Image (cartoon, grey):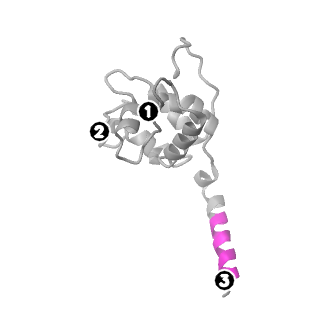
Amino acid sequence: MTLAHLGTIAALTVLLQGIASPAAAQSLDYGFFKARVEPIFLAKRPGHVRCYVCHAERSNNGFRLEKIAPGDKFWTEEQSRRNFEAVSRLVAPGDPGKSLLLLQPLAPEAGGNAYHTGGRQFATKNDPQWKILAQWVNGRAAPPAKCSSSASPVC
């Protein structure tokens, strides 16, 4: 078998795997990530620190967010793109049940991982912010929720 044949077989294998796996065929939406997911990382939750505090300042794990410049309140476009790439590696598109981004901060009683040093950010899968993360992983770019306060970046 020639090298050209091996290359063709390899390309077809990759193509067929993408067709056979609906999760692999789905893509994650950057616009939804920037508008709805990133603000969750900055949101203060009662009894917890912001995700950003541990995952930008002192993160030594696979979930590392870009540092926001002093005086700024949000990431630049370039930083958001890098955050998107980093966070995308923590999800299985189309399968929230296999996505570390959703399992790590979820209480074990609700199906989350038992170990997360940041605590249980989400007690249940019914938490509105957990649902936003799940929507993104599922590839559903739902329209933004109506907020009762324009000061809140996350509804």
Q: CA distance from mark 3 to mark 1?
A: 49 Å
Residue 117: numbered disc? 2
Give me the residue at 44% from left, 41% from top.
101
Which numbered tag is attached to residue 125?
1
Whether residues under marks 2 and 1 lie with C-beta atoms below 8 angstroms apart, the answer is no
Residue 94 spot, x, y in % from top left: 56, 46
**Residues at marks 2 and 3 touching, judged by CB atoms closer than 8 Å:** no
Sequence-first disc among 3 and 1: 3
Q: Secondary structure at mark 3?
A: helix
Which numbered disc flags the more N-terminal residue, 2 or 1? Answer: 2
Cα–Cα span, label 2 and label 3: 49 Å
- Picture coordinates of residue 93, whole percent (x, y): 55, 47
Extreme-front residue of the structure:
70
Label 3 packing within 10 angstroms: few (<14), some (14-19), many (20+): few
Name the mark nearer the viewer: 2 or 1. Answer: 2
Q: Is residue 140 visible?
A: no
Dominant secondary-structure state across the stretch colored magenta: helix
What is the magenta range? 3-16
Residue situated in front as seen by the camera: 131 or 50: 50
Residue under the point 61% across and 24% down: 144
What amino acid is found at the position of numbered circle 3 in the picture? Leu
Q: Quadrant of residue 42?
A: top left
Picture quadrant where residue 17 is located = bottom right
Q: Is residue 23 above or below residue 52?
A: below
- Name the amino acid type tagged 1: Lys
Mark 2: which amino acid?
A: Thr
Q: Secondary structure at mark 1?
A: loop
The residue labelled by disc 3 is 3
Task: Judge whether residue 57 is colored magenta.
Answer: no
Tag of residue 83: none
> Disc 2 or 3, which lies upstream in sequence?
3
User: Quick check: 103 above or below 5?
Assistant: above
